[in-house]
Image (cartoon, grey):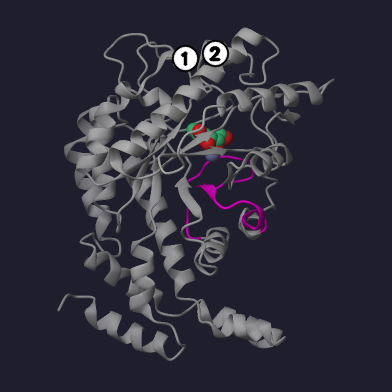
């Protein structure tokens, strides 16, 4: 009997009185993969031989020592993080994390072979892979426009990059036997008031149609597109706005990506899920945490996260909502940043799966008093004991015990870089 069994037995009994089956909840939880974003490991740097500076209005603050400098280091750091996160998960790669053998391979020339090491590593570690074209940190994106650029040559360059990215995604999906989601995010937008909001959007729609022209089996690769309200340097106008991509996704049957940092600060993505899934079969989430703006802070267990988890788990949308993380904090241990965010995402899903059914019943009966009372009482149910038990049964540290392992890794590996 392991140390948490006693706590788990008591929790299971307590939940049973509320018609909640904790064993069943854990079984469902174990089948929900979280896609960890590779870019937390090196501050969105990538491995191109001609290293550029971070562009596209993305900003990473902090200079905590020990960031990954090579693919080997990044993979080692990820392995450490996965060993501290319960369940089987995925890795979300950006195109500029390819391995180009010290050669300059421009973005319009990337091929599946540049990701062979990642694929082999994913296979060995039983991970799925997701993918993203990298339409920033590049001279051809320096003026803030890519797929919607007024210059046809620049548009063609980025179309080719995105086209190849889907093929790489399909190669990953095929090699691993797990569908890859390839997400297109572009920074295109304007700092100050546009004179013409229409033309760039027309060009973006045309470019995307060119990117997606070749049909790819949805078993191998799914295409996703990610809207944004504003960015640094695109405060007044973002070409790929929410309405733009919602319309595009519905008309072209693509996945819409909802990033928690991409809306007005008081606007949550949780409420969008049920609406969008009425009209699209599947979506992708970039779970992030904005603090006053799209600051990409590490995901914590707050109401926003719980609301997102409830929309997924409470409605049985686990298979239709692909969950990815998207944040970058360089002010703390980066392995810990992955671990904290991923554990919180999983913990939030667990809490949602353990929600007493009486809450929904009360609402269905028009008894809003009971709904509120039960919602509040549910906040102190013993989900912590269920979580600890889950961690132990998945052979990862329960409670705060993972921190000592992350600190050890920092001492023995990260601090020597
Ligand atoms: C940017 C988007 C995008 C990026 C990654 C690196 O605002 O959220 O998803 O964070 O592609
Ligand atoms: Zn994002």
Classify residue 211 by image quadrant.
Answer: top right
Segment tinted magenta in the rendering: 275-301
What element does badge 1 sit on? helix
Instruction: Give residue 245's position: percent from left, percent from top.
Output: 67, 38
Residue 142 visible, this angle: no
Determine whether, in the image, residue 207 is placed left or right of residue 201: left
Instruction: Give residue 87's position: percent from left, percent from top.
Output: 30, 58
Instruction: Give residue 98's position: percent from left, percent from top.
Output: 34, 23
Instruction: Give residue 385's position: percent from left, percent from top.
Output: 33, 75
Residue 157 is tagged as 2
Classify residue 96 by image quadrant.
Answer: top left
Is residue 299 on the magenta stretch?
yes
What element does badge 2 sit on? helix
Q: Tags 2 and 1 in contact by the CB under 8 Å rule? A: yes
Q: Determine the CA span between mark 2 and mark 1.
A: 6 Å
Q: Residue at x 53, y 58 (%)?
A: 305
Residue pointed to by mark 1:
108
Looking at the image, residue 267 lies above or below residue 208: below
Instruction: Note whether ligand 1 is within 8 Å of mark 1.
Output: no
The N terminus: image quadrant: bottom left
Is residue 6 on the magenta stretch?
no
Q: Residue furthest bottom?
A: 17
Could you tell which of marks 2 and 1 lies nearer the N-terminus?
1
Instruction: Note whether ligand 1 is within 8 Å of mark 2.
Output: no
Tell me if mark 2 has few (under 14), some (14-19) or many (20+) residues whose alpha carbon lies within 10 angstroms of its own.
Answer: some
Tell me if mark 1 has few (under 14), some (14-19) or many (20+) residues whose alpha carbon lies within 10 angstroms of its own.
Answer: some
């Amino acid at each position: 009997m392991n140390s948490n069994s006693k706590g788990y037995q008591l929790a299971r009994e307590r939940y049973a009185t509320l018609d909640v089956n904790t064993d069943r909840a854990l079984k469902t939880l174990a089948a929900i993969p979280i896609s960890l974003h590779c870019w937390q490991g090196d501050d969105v740097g990538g491995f191109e031989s001609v290293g550029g500076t971070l562009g596209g209005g993305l900003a990473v603050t902090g200079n905590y020592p020990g960031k990954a400098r090579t693919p080997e280091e990044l993979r080692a750091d990820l392995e450490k993080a996965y060993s501290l996160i319960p369940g089987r998960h995925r890795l979300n790669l950006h195109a500029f994390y390819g391995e180009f053998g010290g050669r300059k391979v421009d973005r319009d020339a990337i091929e599946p072979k540049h990701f062979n090491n990642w694929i082999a590593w994913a296979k060995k570690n039983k991970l799925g892979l997701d993918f993203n074209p990298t339409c920033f940190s590049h001279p051809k994106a320096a003026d803030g426009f890519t797929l919607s650029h007024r210059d046809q040559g620049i548009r063609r360059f980025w179309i080719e990059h995105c086209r190849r990215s889907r093929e790489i995604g399909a190669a990953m999906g095929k090699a691993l036997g797990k569908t890859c989601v390839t997400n297109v995010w572009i920074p295109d937008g304007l700092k100050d008031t546009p004179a013409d909001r229409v033309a760039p959007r027309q060009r973006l729609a045309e470019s995307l149609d060119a990117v997606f022209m070749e049909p790819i089996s949805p078993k191998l690769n799914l295409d996703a597109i990610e809207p944004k309200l504003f960015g640094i340097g695109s405060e007044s106008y973002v070409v790929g706005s929410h309405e733009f991509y919602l319309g595009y996704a519905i008309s072209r049957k693509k996945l819409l990506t909802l990033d928690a940092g991409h809306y007005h600060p008081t606007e949550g993505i949780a409420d969008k899920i049920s609406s969008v899934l009425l009209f699209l079969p599947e979506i992708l989430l970039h779970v992030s945490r904005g603090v006053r703006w799209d600051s990409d802070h590490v995901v914590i267990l707050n109401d926003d996260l719980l609301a997102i988890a409830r929309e997924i788990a409470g409605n049985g949308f686990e298979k239709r909502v692909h969950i990815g993380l998207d944040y970058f904090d360089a002010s703390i241990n980066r392995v810990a940043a992955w671990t904290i965010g991923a554990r919180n995402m999983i913990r939030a899903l667990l809490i949602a799966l353990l929600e007493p059914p009486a809450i929904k019943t009360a609402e269905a009966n028009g008894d809003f008093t009971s709904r509120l009372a039960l919602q509040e009482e549910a906040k102190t149910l013993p989900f912590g004991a269920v979580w600890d038990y889950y961690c132990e049964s998945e052979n990862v540290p329960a409670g705060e015990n993972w921190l000592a392992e992350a600190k050890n890794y920092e001492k023995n590996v990260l601090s020597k870089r």
